[in-house]
């Protein structure tokens, strides 16, 4: 089980290291999956070696059991040939094989149990890595949304904290209002001046006409009052 403990330690170390360095989530997740995949390969190799050891113990067990049967057959053959001493020697060899087989069986069963546990852990680890791979894109998308929201919020905060931009717009709006008011006033003044000048001209003309009429009447009256020189 040590290989999986080492994998867990390595993964935890990598995660803590990348988080502490404030890596971008996408880069961090990709690197983490690469590390996990590499360690998974190493773990598979270790499990394969454990399986190989199990198979070797199983073969040794089968070999000892096969030899035990063979010595038993030889002992029977010796008995049939009335060679009891040879039969006893064969039985002693059979017993040695049986004892060895018993030890090999214990070792093989323990190794088989360990291999079964390693296989189950390996399947669980592989499933989790595959699940992490499926979740990666979702996590990256969420991270990008969060990053975008942070940038927007940061911009809003910076603008709200410093009213320079908004103040500039307000001042420009006030200036435009003032310019429009001045333009309207100038036009109104120009129109008033033009109208006033025209009215004065007509007043002068009217006064001039009235004065001429009065002078003509006065002249006619004066002429009537003079003595007639024709007589």
Image (cartoon, rainbow, N blue to C red):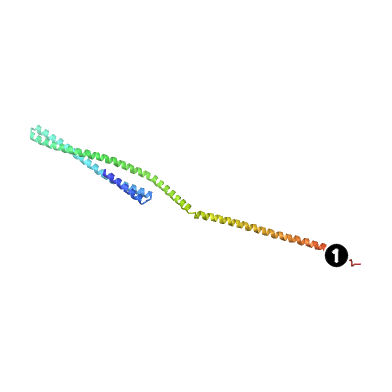
Circle 1 packing at 10 Å, graded few (<14), some (14-19), many (20+), is: few
- Asked whether residue 92 appears in the rendered view, the answer is yes
Residue under label 1: 223
Vertical order, 96 against 29 (above or below)? above
Q: Is residue 56 left or right of residue 188?
A: left
Q: Nearer the viewer, residue 212 or 95?
A: 212
Q: Nearer the viewer, residue 81 or 217?
A: 217
Residue 210 found in image quarter: bottom right
Residue 129 image position (x, y, % from top left): 33, 44
Residue 87 image position (x, y, % from top left): 10, 34
- Asked whether residue 58 appears in the rendered view, the answer is no
Q: Nearer the viewer, residue 82 or 225?
A: 225
User: Which quadrant, please, contains the N terminus?
Assistant: top left
User: Which quadrant, please, contains the C terminus?
Assistant: bottom right
- At numbered mark 1, what does the secondary structure look like: helix, strand or loop? helix
Residue located 64% across and 57% down the image: 188
Residue located 76% across and 61% down the image: 207
Count of marks, rendered view: 1
Residue located 41% across and 46% down the image: 142
Residue 150 image position (x, y, % from top left): 43, 49
Residue 135 image position (x, y, % from top left): 37, 44
Q: Nearer the viewer, residue 98 or 13?
A: 13
Residue 71 found in image quarter: top left
Vertical order, 113 against 200 (above or below)? above
Furthest toward the right, the residue is: 231
Q: Is residue 14 left or right of residue 105?
A: right
């Amino acid at each position: 089980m040590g290989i999986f403990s080492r994998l867990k330690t390595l993964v935890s170390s990598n995660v803590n290291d990348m988080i502490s360095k404030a890596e971008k989530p996408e880069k961090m997740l990709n690197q983490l999956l690469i590390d996990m995949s590499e360690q998974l390969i190493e773990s598979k190799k270790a499990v394969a070696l454990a399986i190989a050891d199990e198979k070797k113990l199983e073969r040794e067990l089968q070999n000892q059991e096969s030899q035990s049967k063979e010595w038993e057959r030889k002992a029977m053959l010796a008995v049939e040939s009335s060679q009891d001493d040879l039969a006893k020697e064969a039985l002693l060899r059979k017993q040695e094989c049986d004892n060895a087989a018993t030890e090999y069986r214990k070792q093989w069963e323990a190794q088989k149990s360990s291999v079964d546990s390693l296989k189950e852990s390996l399947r669980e680890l592989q499933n989790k890595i595959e699940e992490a791979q499926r979740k990666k894109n979702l996590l990256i998308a969420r991270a990008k949304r969060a990053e975008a929201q942070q940038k927007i919020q940061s911009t809003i905060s910076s603008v709200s904290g410093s009213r320079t931009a908004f103040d500039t717009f307000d001042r420009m709006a006030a200036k435009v209002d003032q310019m429009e008011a001045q333009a309207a006033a100038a036009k109104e003044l120009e129109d008033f001046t033009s109208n006033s000048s025209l009215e004065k001209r007509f007043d002068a003309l009217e006064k001039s006409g009235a004065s001429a009429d009065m002078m003509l009447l006065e002249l006619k009256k004066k002429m009537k009052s003079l003595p007639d020189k024709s007589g």
